[in-house]
Amino acid sequence: MPRIVRLYGLLAWVWVRAAAQYPVSAALLMIGSVVTTGLDVAAIFIIFRHTGSLGGFTLPEVMFLYGTAGLSFGIADLLFGNVERLGRHVRAGSLDAMLIRPASPFVQIAVERFSFQRIGRTAQAAIVLWIGLAGVSVPWQRAWMIPVMVACGVVIFAAVWTFAGAVQFLLTDAPEVANAFTYGGGQLTQYPLSVYGADLVRAVTFIVPLAFVNWQPGLFVLGRPDPIGLPHWLRFLGPVVALALAALAALAWRAGLRRYRSTGS
Amino acid sequence: MIELDEVGRTFTVSRRTGVLRRERRVVHAVRDLSFTVAAGEFVGYLGPNGAGKSTTIKMLTGILTPSVGRVRVAGLDPSRRRTALARRIGVVFGQRTTLWWDLPLKDSFQLIRHLYKVDREAFHRRLDELCEVLELGAFLATPVRQLSLGQRMRGDIAAALLHDPAVLVLDEPTIGLDVVSKAAVRGFLRGLNAERGTTVLLTTHDLGDIERLCRRVMLIDHGTLAFDGTVEDLMATAPGETSIEEVVTRLYTRAAPS
C-alpha cells in the first residue's frame, strides 16, 4: 500500500511539471471548474428563495450535505476519476503500453494527466461545507463523523469508478452506463435524499450504497431521524460499506484484467 | 531465456446475425506452440498477417493470458508475474508508442525511471549512452507527438532499454522507417546483442531485418510453428530459389495444415 501511494505521488509530480508547460490551458481548466461548480451552488440558493426547506432540511443543512458529498466526489475524481477512461485505453492500445511497465495499470491510468487544476471542485465543496457548518450547530460528540464520512465517501466513489473501469475490460463502450453511477451518483448525493422517493433511497442504501457517502452519516451529524424510518445503526455502517465495496471493486478489476483481450495488432 | 510449451490462445468472436441473435465462434490465434530461445540469441519471428505473431508477443510480455500451455520468460510466468517480469524485459511496439504522447521525450524517460525504480546515477549513465548511440540529443525536449516516426522509434527503443533488460522483444520495429533510420535501428540492435549479450526476439515483415540481423528464424503460420532454423536452413527449404522473399512467399502460401 505505501509503495502504491509513493508511486502515485512520484508519477503525479511528473504530470504536474509537464502541465506547467501550458500555463494558459491550466488557468482555463481551473476557471472552468470553478464556474461550473459555482452554478451548482447558485441552483441551491435559487431553490431556497422559493422555499424555506428542501426535503425537510434548512439551507445550512443542505449546504452541509452538498459540501460533504462534493468534497468526497471531488477528491475521488481528482485521484481516480481517470479510471473510467479505461475503454479509451483499451481501444487505443495504450493499455498494452501500461501492462509492460512494472507498475499497477490501475495507478498508471488513475494518475494520467494528474493536475491540481482539477482541485477546483474540491475547493468549492470545502467552502460550501464550511459555510454550511457555520449555520448548523454540531456538538463534538457528533462532529467526529465529518472526516470519517468524507473519507468513506472518497472510497465509495473510487470503488464505483473502479467498477466502471472493470466493466470496460469486456465492454469497451460502457462509459455512458458507468457515468450514470459515477457522475449520476455525484449529482444524486448533492441533495438530501429525502427529496427523492423512498424506493430510490432504499436502492441507494442497499444496492448501490451511495447513501453511505453523506446521507446516513449526515443524519447522525445533524441529529435527524431517518425520514423513511430506516434503522438507526445504518448511520455507522459507512466504513464497513466502503471497505466491502472497495474489496469487491478490486476483485472485479483483477477479473477484468485477466480477461483482457488487447487489440488486433 | 524464453520457453513456450504447447501454448495456445483462443478468442471468442461474436458476430451479429440478426437484431438480437449472435453467432459465437472460437478462433485459435495460437495453438500447440512450443519453442525455446537461449540467452544471447537473436531470433527473427516471421509470419503472415493474422498468423499469431502479436498474440505470441503479448503472451510473452504478460499482456495476454494464454488459454493453455506454459510460458516462461527469464524464469517467470508472464501473466502471473507480470510486474516482476517487466523489470527484466524491454518491449517495443512498432505500430504504437509506449511513450506518453504529450510529454517531451526526457519527461517520458523520467517517468520510466520512477516506474522501474532505476537509481538516478545508473539512469543518467544509461541515458547518456543511449542518447549517443541512438542520437537522441537533438529532440529530447520535443513532445513525443511532434517527433518523426524515425525519431519516435529511436525514443521507444531507448525507453525499453533504460532499465537494462536481459531480453528485448520488438514487434515490427522497422515498420514505416526510411532506409537511413532502418539502418540506424538495425546497427543499434546488432551492437546491443553482440556487446551486451541482450537476447533479442523481433517480429517483422521486412526480410532485410532477418537477413542482416537474425541468426535464427522462426516462422509461424495459422498459429503454429511452420519453420525453425537458421537463415541458411530457411533458404534450403526451397532449392533453386535465390531470394529470401521468394522462399518466404512459398512458405506463406503453402496449404494450411488442417
Image: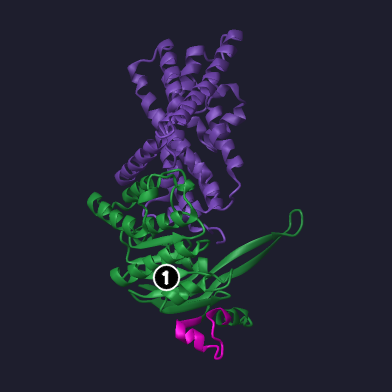
Chain colours: A purple, B green
Residue B77 shows in this picture = no
The magenta stretch is B227-246
Q: Is residue A155 magenta?
A: no
In the rendered image of this protein, does residue B255 appear above or below residue A230? below
Q: Position of residue B218 (x, y in %)?
A: 47, 78
Residue A59 shows in this picture = yes
Residue name at image x 33 percent, y 74 percent: B40
**A205 vs B122, nearest the viewer:** B122
In the rendered image of this protein, does residue B241 appear above or below residue A230? below
Q: Is residue B242 magenta?
A: yes
Q: Position of residue B10 (x, y in %)?
A: 56, 68
Q: Which chain is mark 1 on?
A: B
**A220 vs A182, nearest the viewer:** A182
**B67 vs B196, nearest the viewer:** B196
Q: Residue extending furthest bottom?
A: B239
Q: Which residue is mark 1?
A: B201
Q: Residue extending furthest front?
A: B180
Q: Position of residue A29 (x, y in %)?
A: 49, 28
